[in-house]
Amino acid sequence: MIKLPVNYLEIEEIYSNSLGKGMRSLAVTAANPGEGCSTLAYALSKRSELDGKKTLLVEVNILHPELGDISGHQHTDWFPTAQSADANIMRTNDLNLDVLPAPCDSDVLRFRNIATMSKLMQHWLENYDAVIFDTSPVNARNRNNIPAETVCAMVDGAVFIVMAGVTQQTQFKTALDRLTQNDVSLVGVVFNDYQNPRMVDEIYRETYRLDKWFPGTMEKFRRYIKRSSFFNIQL
């Protein structure tokens, strides 16, 4: 999992429009695996903790857990009860940030019960200022999955991530329809540009192909590209 610097302006904007506005529970989800849910969920958790909020980061992506490098455990054997969940919460080096790693998939049906999960949610809100969920992909449909729309429906708001240049329009629409059908309150859509380089980066990279013939000219052109306000315009 990539760890984003918590001082990024993009993180600040997402935080200020969700937890910073008074929301106490938030879910981060996406249409497909690998779109950056764990990265964003952790960054928002850190931002919340730095804001003085006692924060709990809960991972409910059973098939592809990514928070093990923070908690030290990929899975823990917990169930959706206050006693079981609290016994498996991992303390981090941050004073006000706790992590609950992904549960084992031995009894996934209990996590699909909205009443049970809502009761656990209420318990957490009595002990934490903010609860953030790292969910499974909305379009992941299998027998060992905790549906993302179930988790997103019980929180104050959900953030939807789209991997720019990768996520297909049909995949996005299918996931969005499922969230809408479950009355999920969508805070916003975040575009992840990790696999979609900026124009200036692509032009800069292509100049190296001409170094064999014009090394001096290409080096000057690269310096110009870096300084150019036109090539570095934010789209």
Image (cartoon, helix red, strand yellow):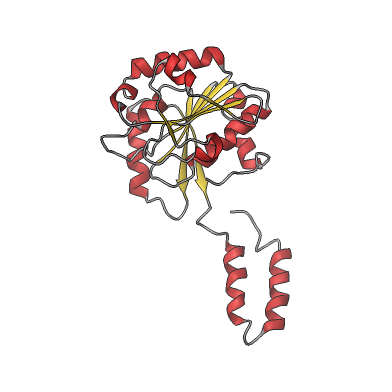
In the image as oriented, which residue stretches furthest toward the bottom? Answer: 213
**Looking at the rendering, which quadrant does residue 206 occupy?**
bottom right
In the image as oriented, which residue stretches furthest toward the left? Answer: 143
Q: Name the residue located 65 percent from the left edge and 63 percent from the top edge.
A: 231
Decide if residue 8 is on the left or right side of residue 158: right
Residue 143, position as x, y percentages in the image:
25, 35
Q: Name the residue located 62 percent from the left edge and 28 percent from the top edge.
A: 48
Q: Name the residue located 34 percent from the left edge and 24 percent from the top edge.
A: 111
Residue 189, position as x, y percentages in the image:
49, 39
State the residue in front, 214 or 183. Answer: 214
Relative to 180, does residue 127 appear above or below in the rendering?
above
Residue 81, position as x, y percentages in the image:
40, 16
**Looking at the rendering, which quadrant does residue 220 occupy?**
bottom right
Q: Name the residue located 42 percent from the left edge and 54 percent from the top edge.
A: 166
Relative to 27, does residue 175 appear above or below in the rendering?
below
Relative to 33, does residue 197 appear above or below in the rendering?
below
Relative to 77, does residue 233 appear above or below in the rendering?
below
Decide if residue 213 is on the left or right side of residue 56: right
Residue 114, position as x, y percentages in the image:
34, 19
